[in-house]
Amino acid sequence: MKRVLILLLSLLPASLTWLSCGGSSSPSSSTKASGLDYRAFVTNSVTSGTGAAGVYIVNAATDVRPVISPISAGNTPGMMVLTPNRAQTLVFSGNGTPFSDNQFTVIENATETAAGHVTLPGVTESFVVSPDSSTAYVAVPTAPVVGQSPGVIQVISLSSGTVLGTISCPLGNPAPAVCVSADPNLQGINPPYRYLSIGNTGTRLLAFSEGAGQNSDSVPNVVAVITPSSLGTASAVISLVPGFDHPVWAYFNSDDTTAYVVNCGAECGGQQASVQPLDLTTNPPTPGTAVPVPAATVALVNNSTMYLAGTPAPPQPCPAGTQATSCGLLTVFDLSHMTATNSTPIIITDGYHSRMSLGANGQLFIGARTCTEVVAPVPPPQGAEVRGCLSIYNTQTGAVVIPPTNGDVTGIQPIATRDVVYVIQGQNLQGGSLYIYDTTTDALEFNPNDPNNPGQVSNLIGNFVDVKTVDF
C-alpha cells in the first residue's frame, strides 16, 4: 500500500515567519489604516517608479483609492482567498521563474497588516480554507518528495501560525496513515495534486491530480478523498479514486455526502468534459456515471444550477460579426436532474476559463486566459472590433456580451451592495487593470471620481492580478 506522510517541517524547503497570531480579529475593527467600512483588496505584482508591489486597498463603496501604502505580500502577489469568517486574506506570490519567492502571506483584515509569511516549496494554483477558518490547505504539485515523484499538499494553521506538515504518498514510509485504492496502477504513485476543493462541513477535502493544461496522461487521473480530522492519527486513510477524466473542481451537496466533480476532458488532453457524481458515503468512495458536457474548466453553482465554461477540442466556431475564429461554450446544467438545460449553444470567448462570478441583475461574468484577442490598430478606425477574454452572460435573458477590452481575466469580484462588478483584465498585454462594470448595462461604469476614464479608479496604477472584497 502507498502511505500518506505528514512530513515534518524540516523535510521540505518550507520556512515560516509569523509576526502575530490572528484568526479571531473582527473585520470591523477601528484599527484599519484605511478607515474604510467596505474594502476591496487588489494585488499588484510589480514594483515600479509609480508604486510598490503589494495589496492595494480600494473603497468598494465609492471606487476611490485611499492614500495609504500597500500591504506587503511578497515580490509578485497575485491569487487571493478570503477566509470564511472574513478575518483574514491569504495571498500567494510566485511567478514560476527561478527567482520566484513562492511566498504565502496571511493578512489580518482588521488591521490591514501582514500577520505572517510562509515560503512554499513551489508554485501553487489552488488553496482552500476549512469552514471554521482555522486551517489552509495548499496544493504544491512541483514540491520535491524524497524517493518519490513531486507533489504535496501543505497544511497551515491560520490561528497559531504553525506549518502543521504536508500530505503526500511516499511508498513504504512508515507513517500512521495509508493511501488506498482499488486500482493497482495507483500503488507506489504520489499524484501531483494541482487543484483542491473542500466540503461545506470541512469533513472532506478533495485533491485532483492531472489538472487542466498538463495535456499528459503520464500520471493517472485521480481524486484523493481526504478526511482532515483523521490526519496524523492511526485511523487516517486517504482514498485514491480513479475513473475520472482530468478532474479540476468539485461542488459538494449540503451534507457533504455527494461531490459533483467537474472533468476537463478533451481540453486538458483527455477524452470528454463532464459532470460526475462521487458518492462519499461508501468506503471507498464511489464515482458515478459521468454526464458529458461540451467543455468545462471552471464552474459556478447557484441553487441547483451549475454553470460550466470551457473551450471544446476542437474549438467552437464563432458566429458572424467577429474576427475571432475560435470560441468557447457555456453550459447550463441542472444538478437535480443531472442534465444540461440550454437547448442551443451559448457561445463565449475561447481560452482557458478560470474565473466565474455571478453579479447583480443575474449577470454571470466569465473570465479566461490565452483567448483569441482582436486588437484594433492604432489609431483605431471607427467601429474597429476589440475583443479579449471576458464574457458576460445574462442568466435572465440568455444574451451574451463580449466587452471591447483586451487581455486575460485574472480576477472577478461582484460588489454586493451595488450593481457593479470589479474585473482585473489585461495581464498578458499592457498589464492588469481594474475595470468597473455596471451590471445594468454590461458596460464600464461612469465613475464621477474619474470622469475622463470610464470604469477606472484614479490613482490606481500597477500590474494587477486579483481582487476580493473583505467586508460583509
Image (tube, rainbow, N blue to C red):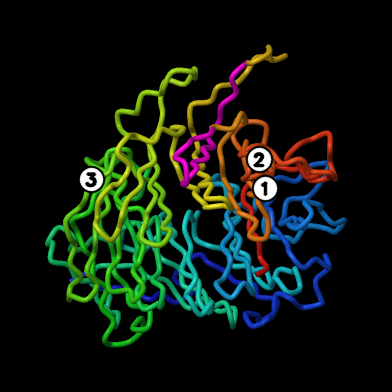
Q: Are marks 3 and 1 in contact (CB under 8 Å)?
A: no
Disc number placed over residue 432 in the picture, else none: 2
In this rendering, the label closer to the viewer, 3 or 1: 3
Mark nearest the camera among 1 and 2 is 2
Closer to the N terminus: mark 1 or mark 2? 1
Horizontally, is 349 left or right of 5 in the view? right
Give percent across and percent down for residue 230: 33, 83
Q: Residue furthest top?
A: 381
Closest to the observer: 405 or 188? 405
Residue found farthest to the front: 397
The residue segment tinted magenta is: 384-401
Quarter placement of the N terminus: bottom left
Q: Where is residue 266? Give x, y as percent.
A: 27, 38
Residue bearing the label numbered 1: 45
Amino acid type, residue under disc 1 in the picture? Ser
The quarter holding residue 2 reads bottom left
Q: Amino acid at mark 2?
A: Gly
| Mark drawn on residue 292 | 3
Q: Residues within 10 Å of mark 1 (few under 14, many from 20)?
A: many
Circles 1 and 2 in contact, beta carbons < 8 Å:
yes
Q: Residues within 10 Å of mark 2 (few under 14, many from 20)?
A: many
Mark in the foreground, 2 or 3: 3
Q: Amino acid at mark 3?
A: Pro
Q: Is residue 229 above or below residue 171?
A: below
Q: Are marks 2 and 3 in contact (CB under 8 Å)?
A: no
Whether 365 is among the magenta residues is no
Residue at 45% from the left image edge and 42% from the top image edge: 353
